[in-house]
Amino acid sequence: IRLIIKNRPLKLPLLFQFFLKKKSLEMLRAFTKCLLTNGVAGRRMMSQGSLAGKVAIVTASTDGIGLATAQSLGKRGAHVVVSSRRQANVDKAVSLLRSENIQVTGTCCNVGNSEDREKLISTTLEQCGGIDFLVSNAAVNPFFGNILDSTEEVWNKILHVNVTAAFLLTKQVVPHMEKRGGGSVVLVSSVAGYQPMQGLGPYSVSKTALLGLTRALAPDLAQSNIRINCVAPGIIKTRFSTALWQSEDLRNELLKQMSIKRLGKPEDIGEVIAFLCSDEASFITGETITVTGGMNSRL
């Protein structure tokens, strides 16, 4: 660390010697103030308003990771558009976010339905005037068991909602992001995309597909100044993942695989997603960030 005093660089150890020699409490206070107001601290303080004027669509955002993501983006100043298949869930989430002074619009949306996707886009444009960020968080898992027992119907549903809809929604927002000079897309995958979980074969495959989709889209989207990244959560304590952590025995087995001995929280993921949408991540695209507490996550 170096400071400039009288146009001369002064090394930190020598600076402390200077303070000790002078025994100047006033100078020490000034030095502390300087550290607190340096560029890094300044950027941290500004981060709470760093997304002001931006508009973010977050799918499946009335609970769990989606809701935490809406909160993280909203607290940084973004206008968030939340959605769910049930109006009651939308109303509840909108009420909560407004109580936290977050700008929010809510609408029903089943991302597997093309008309609902169109409605999500049109509602966002009508209410907010544009689109800067898309967080594709919606997913389904109607099957648990031996992968060989899964049916064509199961595969079609999982791949359609978890992968195809994510691609189609990304494709739909691109023209609107281009009008704003660029944007950011974040796809929500899973640690299961790296290490398939027993009983969750088709779901795990769909999450692996999102890793590839992210890398495939990145070069083409970059031409429009749009970044796309992926987040792969580990075991996060949400309603969606109840089957994985509700049993104490299973939970303890999973904790053995983690370096950080706790279940993840939805906000652990929301904060990473907010970072990927921000200018601080302006040189990151085509990547997947694993947020797993240290679980093995390598293909």
Image (cartoon, rainbow, N blue to C red):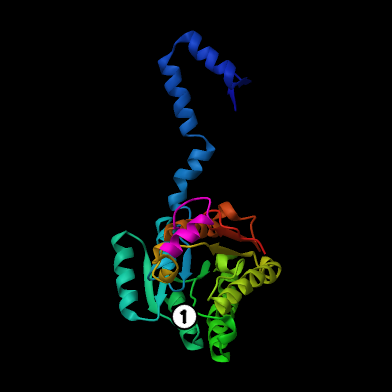
Crowding around mark 1 (Cα neighbors within 10 Å: few <14, some 14 to 19, many 20+) is: some
Magenta stretch, residue numbers: 249-264
Q: Image check: 37 left or right of 202?
A: left
- Where does the C terminus fall, quadrant-wise? bottom right
Residue 94, percent from left and from top: 33, 69
* Residue at 48%, 44% in the rendered image: 44
Residue 20, percent from left and from top: 49, 12
Q: Image check: 101 left or right of 125?
A: left
Q: Quadrant of residue 84?
A: bottom left
User: How many circles with numbers are drawn on the protein?
Assistant: 1
* Residue at 64%, 64% in the rendered image: 225
- Where does the N terminus fall, quadrant-wise? top right
The vertical placement of 140 against 190, above or below, is: below
* Residue at 60%, 85% in the rendered image: 148
From the image, tell me which residue sits under label 1.
122
The vertical placement of 180 against 41, above or below, is: below
Secondary structure found at label 1: helix
- Does residue 56 show up magenta in the picture? no
Q: Image check: 111 left or right of 247?
A: right
The vertical placement of 48 against 161, above or below, is: above
Say which of 88 and 141 sits in front: 141
Say which of 168 and 149 sits in front: 149
